[in-house]
Amino acid sequence: MKYLVMIYGTQADYEAMGGKASPGTPAWTEKDLGAMFQFMEAVNNDLAEAGELVDGQGLAEPRQAIVVTSGADGSSVVSDGPFGESKEVLAGYWVLDCASDERVTEIAKRVHQCPVPEGTRPSEVVIRQIMEAPPA
């Protein structure tokens, strides 16, 4: 079965990774970033070796989002994302091909253990099964 494993963050989280603290979100150091990248690289390598990794990417910060919505006349309107400081957004994902819900949950629990600076709330990890089209 295929699954989408997602991690979430806020604009403040991205800024903290760039060294800018905010209330409740301490700044990350180069050492903190290095530990996070090393951890994620190990997760990705293990998933690739197990044949479970289909794809995985980190996403650009929310302020770089482009949003397409409907205008009053029904036409498409393109704008910057309406993402406030505290609004959580998708920060990264993995598409995994796992044998069971138990296995993908084991992976998500590992991802949740990613090192973060003291005082930082770990990212929420959400698992969604990818639905497949029924046979023709």
Image (cartoon, grey):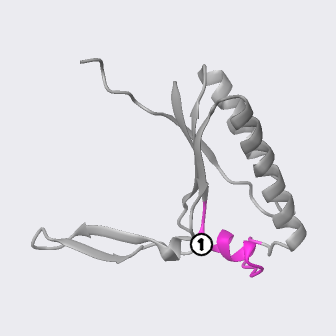
Q: Say if 109 sits above or below 73 in the image.
A: above
Query: In terms of depth relative to the viewer, which is nearer, 73 or 23?
Result: 73
Q: Which residue is mark 1?
A: 11
Query: In terms of depth relative to the viewer, which is nearer, 58 or 108?
Result: 58
Q: Residues within 10 Å of mark 1 (few under 14, many from 20)?
A: many
The residue sitting at 66% across, 22% down in the picture is 102
Residue 36 on the magenta span: no
Quarter of the image with the C terminus is top left
Residue 16 on the magenta span: yes
Q: Position of residue 61 (x, y in %)?
A: 57, 71
Q: Position of residue 127 (x, y in %)?
A: 56, 37
The boundaries of the magenta stretch are 9-25
Q: Quadrant of residue 130?
A: top left
Q: Say if 90 sits above or below 45 in the image.
A: below
The residue at the far bottom in this view is 20
Q: Position of residue 75 (x, y in %)?
A: 14, 70
The residue sitting at 86% across, 65% down in the picture is 32
- Is residue 43 shown to the viewer in this render? yes
